[in-house]
DNA sequence: TTTAGCACTCTAGAGGCCTGAGTGCTAAGG
DNA sequence: CCTTAGCACTCAGGCCTCTAGAGTGCTAAA
């Protein structure tokens, strides 16, 4: 795979830039006009024919201009695109929006909105993985003599609740002591390491605890399993893209975004790079082959905490999208760190 | 507005039934064939012309069959439709699904899924209104000496958390006592009645409390304001309807479903009937005029707790949709009551 | 290697034609 | 008076043809 250089490279960039902007096939004359290339359209034609030969461009039909292929977008993203930095006024607006002191839950929703509004594509944001979170407190809140509510507070400011059936009647005071005792011992653990077994070892075998311990273990297990609480926003944006003008084209994509497994796949595919881009045919899922996804991991306290992504047509404004995704991933991580 | 009777009424029903099933204009011959009406197509034509005159039917063009108008659907829904009862096997399947003992949050999500899957339209479900809920407990969980987490437990099994900055350093034990004291006094109140002022009266003017009281009041206020946590499902189903084959038709609808104010309007419009139907042009919002909405209130412990709805084309399978919405509203209420 | 020139290809859109579905009206019949 | 057979009429949609214009690839000269 020879590298593309000089004028040819420039032409590829221009074709893709223009196509992204107009959604219309780009002809040789149009390329020459733009960025006043000092060559004739015939020369441009030769170069474009070569680029087509190499698999980066395509003609919808013989007498049409060129359109990028997925491979074309790939080299564009890897080496041609100029990132469109998020303007500083936008940065501060978004910062302000995310640093509003409130529940993590709301921050997640707001990031999703900001991503969708800022790109005109759909966005997906996953709340912090529980397994990576570190327990700070665990509380039992007595409801009735035989039932209590478990509340777990973690470093990511998130907490989850579930009611537990107690084996023996327990007074609020007892409950409190119990709660403090368990709490003291599990504080500092990663949730992912806290299996039922680990908890039993940690706490010993006091009869009353047994039930609670099991329940807490189960709670944590459940939560980790169902952990990826996902916020999706801006699906309607996809319908505004000319390539999805026909609802039958859009339907598989929106359906996919409603299925949990698919979204998880979208968010986690593509290795461990901080920003991951999957273009058209690179997708494992058939339904996603008309789209591109830009996914990123956000970090809280240096550890990977969750993922976010945008989903748009392969004809995506990569320059803009990449910087926005990166910026919001960073900012979200920061914001959650402060809660 | 004379009532429609006898054969004419029957013909209107047949036209609408058939149109709902096929999405194609219905001609006089087709009407006669179906349900072997013992009249000629000419007679049917006369009746259909009358029904068009009355505003219940419409012709897309002179040489086409008839299509129901929104007013036609209205009388259909009010007096012609035969409800398609939810089969008992489906009932038990849905019951089982909803009575899984877990968080209210999950029950909401599952109802939304069931509605969408069971109708092939989009669904919207609102979690229980907080203002109607009755406080059972209120707990402060100490995080650091100067910060605590507020947890409110209500009768609908839902609880919400927020951290509060304390005025003075407070030991866990103090925090606990504080918490118990507040809790004892606010238990039994409707959340909607608990303004900051009401709380201050209730609790008196102990200095340390002030801050906490204000914060709790604010928490509750916020939560009530932002209370309608909404779960939407099956937007992609809308794209499968032939009337939304063109994405530009579907886009306004899906956009609307992404906007909180609109969804709230959809859920609450139409008075206080247990099941409310809004058809096409009856919608206040321009964007919704191509759709019909069937909304219902679900009750927990005899009080209205929340709303759910489905959104589909005006050519909706009303018979099926109405019974499913009603059944799921009832069942959800029951299920939440048991948590 | 570049470029002017040219013949060629193909789509999108306009216009014309035809078919079939379904209508409304009229006049005859129970 | 209601019903119905018969018939003329209308119109969307499919299909064809034609044209204009965009953009191409190739050739041969600079």
Image (cartoon, coloured by chain):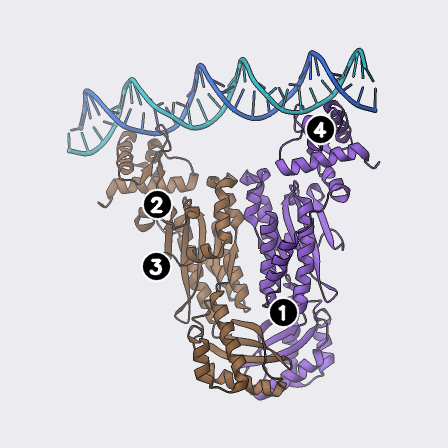
Chain colours: A purple, B brown, C blue, D cyan
Residue named by callout 3: B271
Mark 1 → mark 3, Cα distance in angstroms: 38 Å
Mark 1 → mark 2, Cα distance in angstroms: 48 Å
Mark 3 → mark 2, Cα distance in angstroms: 19 Å
In the image, residue A37 lies at what x, y percent? Answer: 74, 30
Mark 4 → mark 3, Cα distance in angstroms: 63 Å
Name the quarter where the N terminus of chain B is drawn: top left
Q: Is residue B35 visible?
A: yes
Q: Is residue A229 visible?
A: no
Residue named by callout 4: A32
Which of label 3 and label 2 is nearer to you?
3
In depth, the one of B82 and B313 nearer the eye is B313
Q: Is residue A338 left or right of residue B289?
A: right
In the image, residue A251 lies at what x, y percent? Answer: 56, 44
Q: Residue at x 42, y 75 (%)?
A: B193
Q: Are marks 2 and 4 on the same chain?
A: no
Residue named by callout 2: B73
Mark before the other along the chain sequence, 4 or 1: 4
Residue named by callout 1: A158
- Is D14 drawn above or below residue B220 in the view shown? above
Q: Are marks 4 and 3 on the same chain?
A: no
Q: Are marks 1 and 3 on the same chain?
A: no
Query: Tag 4, which secondary structure?
Result: helix
């Amino acid at each position: 795979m020879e590298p593309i250089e000089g004028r040819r490279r420039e032409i590829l960039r221009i074709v893709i830039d223009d196509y992204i902007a107009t959604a219309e096939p780009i002809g040789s004359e149009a390329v020459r006009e733009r960025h006043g290339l000092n060559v004739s359209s015939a020369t441009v034609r030769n170069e474009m024919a070569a680029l087509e030969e190499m698999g980066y461009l395509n003609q919808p039909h013989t007498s049409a201009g060129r359109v990028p292929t997925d491979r074309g977008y790939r080299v564009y993203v890897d080496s041609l695109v100029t990132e469109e930095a998020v303007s500083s006024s936008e940065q501060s607006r978004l910062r302000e929006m995310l640093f509003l002191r409130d529940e993590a839950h709301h921050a997640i929703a707001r990031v999703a909105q900001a991503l969708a509004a800022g790109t005109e594509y759909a966005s997906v944001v996953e709340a912090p993985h529980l397994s990576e979170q570190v327990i700070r407190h665990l509380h039992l809140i007595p409801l009735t003599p035989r039932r209590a509510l478990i509340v777990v507070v973690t470093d990511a400011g998130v907490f989850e609740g579930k009611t537990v059936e107690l084996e023996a009647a327990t007074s609020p005071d007892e409950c409190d002591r119990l709660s403090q005792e368990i709490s003291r011992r599990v504080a500092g653990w990663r949730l992912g390491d806290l299996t039922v077994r680990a908890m039993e070892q940690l706490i010993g075998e006091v009869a009353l605890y047994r039930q609670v311990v099991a329940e807490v273990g189960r709670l944590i297990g459940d939560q980790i399993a169902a952990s990826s609480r996902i916020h999706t926003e801006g699906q309607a944006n996809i319908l505004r893209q000319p390539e999805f003008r026909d609802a039958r084209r859009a339907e598989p994509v929106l359906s996919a975004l409603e299925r949990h497994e698919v979204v998880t796949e979208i968010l986690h595919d593509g290795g461990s790079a901080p920003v991951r881009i999957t273009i058209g045919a690179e997708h494992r899922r058939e339904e996603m082959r008309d789209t591109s996804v830009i996914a990123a991991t956000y970090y809280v306290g240096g550890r990977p905490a969750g993922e976010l992504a945008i989903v748009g047509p392969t004809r995506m404004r990569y320059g803009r999208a990449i910087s926005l995704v990166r910026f919001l991933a960073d900012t979200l991580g920061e914001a959650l760190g402060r809660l």
